[in-house]
Image: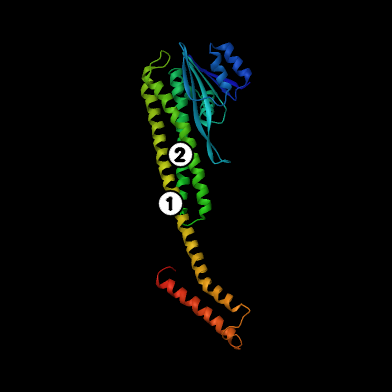
Amino acid sequence: MSIETVTYGKVTWTNIERPTPEDIEVLRRNYNFHPLDLEDCLSKIERPKIDEYEDYLFIVMHFPVYDPDQHVSRPSEVDFFIGSGYLVTVHDGILRPIYQLFDDCQRYERTRAKHMGRGASRLLYSVIDALVDYCFPILDEVDSNIQVIEEEVFTADMRRIVQDISIVRRDIIALRRIIRPQIAIVANLEQKDRPFIQEELDVYFGDIVDHLNKARDILEDHREVIEGLSETSDSVISYRINEVMRILAIISVVMLPLTLLSGIYGMNIALPLARNPYSFAFVIGLMVLLAGGMIFYFKRRGWL
């Protein structure tokens, strides 16, 4: 089993990483949790929500974890059971802030006093606050990727730039889908009074809401920037395609009279200068003259 417990004063924090049916059975025996909530702890696709009961809250939240292989942020679920004198956290063990905070509470008396000495609701705030702060380094990484694209959009290989823009855009969409629903969850904790959550924590949960709103605004700014870069890259690609098409069109127009002239003198009939020993040189010279004249005309018109 992967159940660990730390106690300080009247507060007990039970932490479960990568829950198994045996772990859930332990919770079923030790607490009066609703069976549906316990089933949700084993589900990997549960949406963020708050289920409220007389003596406890069941909270489901998602937080981003960056996948370096796929270059996209994935949601990692954390389930909270918060009641009078206890907090139970259930997660997949990949969110560093939560297991780091739990380890610190196990090892250090000062950390236990700071986060657990003022009740289970203060501990809940500390855990959520650490997880929300964990989002901002990921947002900073997105900002760094956008700056790299901005610097290379006019100079680098456009195929790679388009791919980079698509990757960053996908990551922004994933982060928005993860972060936005959490605002309503924390706002509910701030606005609604409950007997097992201290009233003075309203300000603290409001601060977390402000951080989540800030993260959402940052993502909106990133989305606008990446959309602008996408339009810029499309314009650059269109311009380069037009340049290539213009050169190809000029080559085709220059070759047209030369092909016509060579076709005429390639016919098996009597033609002027056909028996002249200098006919080949004359035809070649005429072709060069036609090509040079057309190129000169195109330059005069600013087409080259």
Which coloring applies here?
rainbow
Q: Residue at x 45, y 41 (%)?
A: 140
Which residue is at the front of the view, 11 or 193? 193
Image coordinates of residue 153 in percent, x first then y, are 46, 53
- Residue ID for mark 1: 232
Label 1 SS = helix
- Residue ID for mark 2: 139
Q: CA distance from mark 1 to mark 2?
A: 23 Å
Q: Which mark is residue 116?
A: none
Q: Earlier in the sequence, mark 1 or mark 2?
A: 2
> In the image as oriented, which residue stretches furthest toward the bottom?
277
Q: Are marks 1 and 2 in contact (CB under 8 Å)?
A: no
Image coordinates of residue 193 in percent, x first then y, are 38, 16
The quadrant of the picture occupied by the C terminus is bottom left
Where is 17 relative to 56, above or below? below
Q: Residue at x 50, y 28 (%)?
A: 62
The quadrant of the picture occupied by the N terminus is top right
Q: Is residue 258 left or right of residue 198?
A: right
> In the image as oriented, which residue stretches furthest toward the front?
269
Q: Amino acid at mark 2?
A: Leu
Where is 281 relative to 104, above or below? below
Of tags 1 and 2, the one toward the viewer is 1
Tell me if mark 2 has few (under 14), some (14-19) or many (20+) residues whose alpha carbon lies within 10 angstroms of its own: some
Image coordinates of residue 257 in percent, x first then y, are 52, 74
Which residue is at the front of the view, 148 or 271? 271
Q: Residue at x 58, y 13 (%)?
A: 28
Q: Amino acid at mark 1?
A: Thr
Tell me if mark 1 has few (under 14), some (14-19) or many (20+) residues whose alpha carbon lies within 10 angstroms of its own: some
Q: Name the image quarter holding residue 30.
A: top right
Image coordinates of residue 61 in percent, x first then y, are 49, 26
Label 2 SS = helix
